């Protein structure tokens, strides 16, 4: 019986790791190297994005209605945008956690967009209105803009800083 090509590659990698004295036990693991500062930042950013998506999902109607603060009045537009943001945050969180190329850059772009939208809302006098960032309870204001810019900067660090061990 012939071994499937994908399995042959996995067995070869396992043999190579065993020859180098690495313990494999035939298990898959996202963390294949010692955790670095950039790696830790990548996982923290992924966690924030996943928590944000989960909070939006848990908030339901109040999370969707928070989009009125940005001028999105139509119920169908609110539902579509709400769902799209949840999907985008979840996909980016999983991509960051798995180390998918381009995920950090995409997260930085999305977070930069969010920061810009928040800043425009503040400048239009909507401070204190629901922002929907972490469900229906979070509020529009300069602290939210700063937090979102900080997260965007963290995503840029993940994207461009060298991920090396000391």
Image (spheres, rainbow, N blue to C red):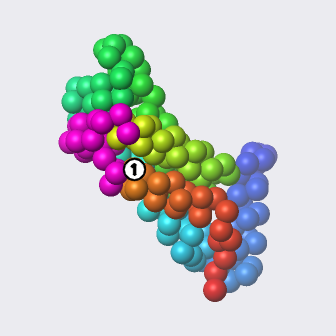
Q: In which quadrant of the rendered view does residue 14 lie?
A: bottom right
Q: Is residue 44 above or below residue 138?
A: below
Residue 67 part of the magenta segment: no
Residue, far bottom? 166
Q: Position of residue 34 (x, y in %)?
A: 57, 77
In the foreground, 72 or 108: 72
Evaluate whether residue 159 shows in this view: yes
Q: Position of residue 19 (x, y in %)?
A: 74, 79
In the foreground, 32 or 142: 142
Image side of residue 42 versus residue 72, left or right: right
Q: Secondary structure at mark 1?
A: helix
Dominant secondary structure of the residues highlighted in magenta in the image: loop
Q: Is residue 9 above or below residue 31?
A: above
Image side of residue 150 versus residue 19, left or right: left
Q: Position of residue 43 (x, y in %)?
A: 48, 62
Magenta extent: 123-144
Q: Position of residue 110 (x, y in %)?
A: 53, 42
Q: Residue at x 49, y 37 (%)?
A: 88
Q: Which residue is disc 1 drawn over?
A: 145
């Amino acid at each position: 019986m012939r071994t499937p090509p994908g399995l042959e590659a996995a067995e070869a990698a396992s043999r190579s790791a065993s020859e180098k004295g690495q313990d494999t036990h035939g298990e898959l693991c996202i963390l294949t190297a010692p955790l670095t500062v950039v790696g830790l930042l990548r996982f923290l950013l992924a966690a924030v994005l996943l928590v944000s998506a989960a909070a939006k999902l848990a908030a339901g109607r109040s999370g969707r209605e928070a989009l009125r603060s940005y001028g999105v009045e139509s119920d169908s537009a609110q539902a579509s945008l709400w769902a799209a943001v949840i999907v985008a945050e979840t996909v980016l969180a999983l991509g960051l956690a798995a180390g998918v190329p381009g995920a950090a850059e995409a997260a930085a772009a999305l977070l930069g967009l969010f920061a810009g939208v928040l800043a425009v809302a503040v400048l239009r006098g909507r401070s204190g209105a629901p922002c929907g960032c972490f469900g229906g309870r979070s509020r529009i204001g300069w602290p939210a803009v700063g937090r979102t810019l900080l997260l965007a900067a963290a995503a840029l660090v993940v994207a461009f800083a060298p991920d090396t061990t000391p």
